[in-house]
Image (cartoon, coloured by chain):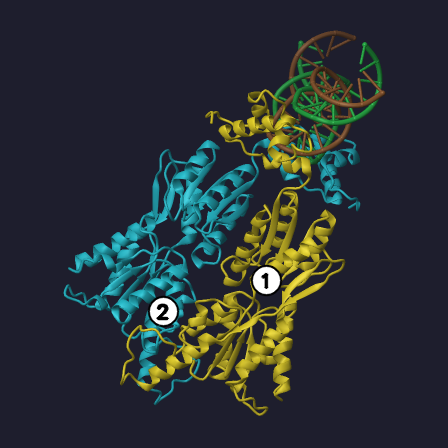
Chain colours: A cyan, B yellow, C brown, D green
DNA sequence: AGTCTTTGCACAATCGATGTTGCACATGAA
DNA sequence: TTCATGTGCAACATCGATTGTGCAAAGACT
């Protein structure tokens, strides 16, 4: 390509091809059949464009077409396996459609979230996904005003379709798993109960999980006391503080812990580092969300694996065929059974002592 | 705002303010002092714009100004703590500058990477960061042709500044840590050695880490044999296969394992699940990269913590004051000591049996 | 040959914002 | 009163693509 200062435009190509800008545009955009441009001219123009390293100026195209080819997605944070897996799927599906994904994190700040929506509107994104919305009502309003298609993921919102995990049944499932290792007893002391920690009680997802948690405990005759539910927000630091306070109150770790999210789990872990050895032996842990590393901690953790890929897939489906109202589509999560068994067996071995060390590293399930 | 079909433009605002589009533009863009627009007119225009829910059409502005306010970043994958932390920092710095971050993942596919660069160019991004580039030479060429500022991160490239981790010394440090638990012995059997696994040997970062690894081993009189270095690529699956094959060859796990990245570590873990109990007792693990959950696995892992925030900070610095050539700025990583001690002590306790269980959950360092 | 149709393309308006230019009016000095 | 100097703003060209319209030339048909 001619190493000029500026990028080539359709005008430059037109001059070189002895043709007009509109013809060049049609030839390169694929509209040439409709516009009856001859095959030979198209070939010529394509060759020259190639030589010149031409590429469409998307700002100009977008301005003219009142679209941008961008699709936005808002997530609370990037550095979290659940949301980063969503980003990965979101991006893959966007590329399949020839769209460019723009992913922004709100840090769970409602104002930041609104600013991001405004910005995306300014850039004329074709539609947006909002995952884990902090202020869904405001978002819906902004989008409606700008006539912008949108779908809520993970946390539902009004005035637009939502795709969410089946939090109620997922939580019930996890609670039952925890109960399989904690004998339910209505007379149990505070320390012998299961505690729910993390999340915001007014958030739909957290609320539904708490309902599931409560339902199962009630079912076995041990309805949770108010203090068994500690919805202290999502940031790791909060969970760390709360778990520390809880341990102080109880004189030790409780019999079971239902952690509401990976970020809260990070905080719980942050406290565990400070605990004396053996502290975890009589505690059973569950986490709503999956992380491949968290699944292999030095103490067993039951995890609920949300299918972020399917969440995103369904979200695209809803964007393509927008239903009228604020439909909510639920996607079932599944448990991740392997780690616990592994870890429990491991511990048993360690406790048994190493009289007959197993051969290192040869394959074979425990 | 008047609930029309379309969004308000400066023309609409001009009409309502009994003024002209250029005046509205100047009033809203902040250039009004330079253009001698009266304060009263500015106030009027601002009020009306607010009422109408006006927001600048960034495509039009970008077209006119030949800039977009977008900044791009390419990373290999989203769902990896190292890169997602980078995204987080990248985004924060971008917002500080009033720019909109566009983050894309290449899946370590050179062709995809080039397509992404082309796309970003089409959208007239102001500059781009490339983290963990797969084909840095091609990227530099594309950017130069489009006259696009760029910086390489994590993996250096030609023709532009680079910010990378001090892989050589980081790897040397990690190797020395591993050696503190594996007696170096020139006569050691294949199984009693330390193996390096993961990464691409021709990648700069991996190459430097291998150099550091080799240097330290050579220093203690045990230069690594060729088969001790298994640069099998980044995908988890590859590492899983290789570690399985290695275990089969050796009749068990080796004495030490230097894992080149988190993704490879995921693969290693994937194999460990299939191993019999007690397999890890005589193996010391190290991983170049940090993940908060991976730091607390059920067996000890030494981790090198790269300072992704500083990497990005330095990258922005280099973008702002672009040096002439292909300068390389190195940022020191640091070890993450806590987990190993914790885990080792934990194990000791478990092995000792539970004659006197520690009080659960009360604070106090091990 | 004359009319009609089809082919192949160029022209010009348009998207919304920016920034240069110039004009009308006001104020102050001579 | 006249000229110089400011002030406040509108007109217009521009960015690079898309798209509705029009118009020659070539071929088809009577």
Residue A132's place in the image compared with A197, above or below, is above
Q: Is residue B48 left or right of residue B140?
A: left
Q: State the separation of the CA atoms marked 2 and 1.
A: 35 Å
Residue at 45% from the left image edge and 84% from the top image edge? B282
* Residue that carries the numbered disc 1 in the rendered image: B310
- State yes or no: discs 2 and 1 in contact (Cβ < 8 Å): no
Residue A95 on image: x %, y % = 54, 47
Residue at 38% from the left image edge and 49% from the top image edge? A154
Please, which chain is the residue tagged with disc 2 on?
A
Q: Is residue A178 left or right of residue A119?
A: left
Q: Give whichever of B253, B30 is nearer the camera.
A: B30
Q: Is residue C3 left or right of residue A288?
A: right
Q: How many marks?
A: 2
Residue B179 on image: x %, y % = 54, 84
Nearer the observer, disc 2 or disc 1? 1
Dots 2 and 1 on the same chain: no
Residue A362's place in the image compared with B14, above or below, is below
Picture disc at residue A339: 2
Please, which chain is the residue tagged with disc 1 on?
B
Residue at 63% from the left image edge and 60% from the top image edge? B314
Q: Tell me, yes or no, if residue B7 can be seen here.
A: no
């Amino acid at each position: 390509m001619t190493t000029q200062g500026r990028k080539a435009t359709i005008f430059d190509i037109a001059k070189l091809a002895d043709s007009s800008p509109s013809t060049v545009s049609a030839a390169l955009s694929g509209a040439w059949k409709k516009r009856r441009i001859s095959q030979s001219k198209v070939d010529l123009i394509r060759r020259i464009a190639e030589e010149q390293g031409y590429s469409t100026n998307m700002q100009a195209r977008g301005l003219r077409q009142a679209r941008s080819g961008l699709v936005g997605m808002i997530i609370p944070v990037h550095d979290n396996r659940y949301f980063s897996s969503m980003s990965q799927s979101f991006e893959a599906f966007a590329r399949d459609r020839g769209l460019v994904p723009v992913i922004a994190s709100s840090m769970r700040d409602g104002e930041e979230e609104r600013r991001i929506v405004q910005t995306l509107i300014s850039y004329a994104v074709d539609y947006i996904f909002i995952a884990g919305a902090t202020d869904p009502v405001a978002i819906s309003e902004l989008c409606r005003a700008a006539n912008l298609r949108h779908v809520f993921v993970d946390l539902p919102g009004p005035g637009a379709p939502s795709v969410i995990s089946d939090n109620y049944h997922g939580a019930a499932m996890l609670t039952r798993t925890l109960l399989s290792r904690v004998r339910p007893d209505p007379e149990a002391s505070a320390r012998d109960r299961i505690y729910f920690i993390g999340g915001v009680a007014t958030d739909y997802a957290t609320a539904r999980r708490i309902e599931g948690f409560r339902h199962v405990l009630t079912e076995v005759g041990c309805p949770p006391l108010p203090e068994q539910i500690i919805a202290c927000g999502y940031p790791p630091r909060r969970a760390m503080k709360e778990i520390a306070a809880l341990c102080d109150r109880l004189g030790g770790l409780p019999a079971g812990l239902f952690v509401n999210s990976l970020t809260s789990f990070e905080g719980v872990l942050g406290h565990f580092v400070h605990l004396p050895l053996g502290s975890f032996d009589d505690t059973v842990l569950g986490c709503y969300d999956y992380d491949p590393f968290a699944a292999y901690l030095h103490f067993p953790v039951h995890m609920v694996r949300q299918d972020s890929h399917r969440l995103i897939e369904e979200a695209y489906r809803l964007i393509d065929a927008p239903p009228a109202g604020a439909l909510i589509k639920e996607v079932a999560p599944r448990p991740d059974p392997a780690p616990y068994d592994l870890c429990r067996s491991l511990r048993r071995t360690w406790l048994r002592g190493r009289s007959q060390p197993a051969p290192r590293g040869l394959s074979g399930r425990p």
